Amino acid sequence: MTLVRQVAKWWRIFRVGSGAGIQRESRTDGALRVVTSTIPGFEAVTKNVTSKGLCLATTLDLPVGTELDFGLEFSDNGFPVRFTGEVCWVRKQQDGPMELGISLASSNERSLSVLEKYLQRAA
């Protein structure tokens, strides 16, 4: 079973709400494939995406503070859009993949513009 299918199955079973009374930026749930050549064996998909960061489901445990150069594969453009991010939190799931919170503060404006357009279409 591919990582995308594992995450989709896990997400349906263990989906947790965002919490009462907590103000959060609106986000889009969805599985976008994450690609990188800088970390051997790294496989990941997004669980949710905002304009400031994303939650990844992955098979690897990366420490907080790890910088990550990666691409997100949006279905409409056929090639990965490059981003630079930093792991800002890690959550180990008992019966599922690791979750990584990635801040996109270091990403370039062009990439963030593509992400904003994706979020607007998904809303």
Image (cartoon, helix red, strand yellow):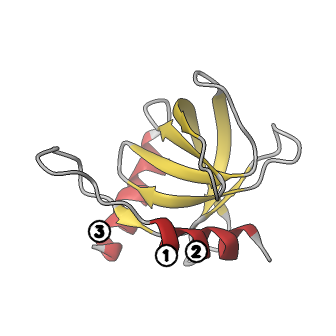
Q: Residues within 10 Å of mark 1 (few under 14, many from 20)?
A: few
Q: Residues within 10 Å of mark 3 (few under 14, many from 20)?
A: few
CA separation in Å, label 3 and label 2: 22 Å
Name, please, the residue furthest toward the top. Answer: 65
Name, please, the residue furthest toward the left. Answer: 21
Q: Is residue 90 left or right of residue 78?
A: left
Kindly identify which residue carries mark 1. 12
Q: Is residue 9 left or right of residue 109?
A: right
Quadrant of the frame with the N terminus: bottom right
Q: Are marks 3 and 2 in contact (CB under 8 Å)?
A: no
Image: 9 above or below 92: below
Question: Which of 66/74 is in front?
Answer: 66
The amino acid pointed to by label 3 is Gln
Element under disc 2? helix
Kindly identify which residue carries mark 3. 120
Q: Residue at x 23, y 49 (%)?
A: 25
Quadrant of the frame with the C terminus: bottom left
Kindly identify which residue carries mark 2. 8
The amino acid pointed to by label 1 is Arg
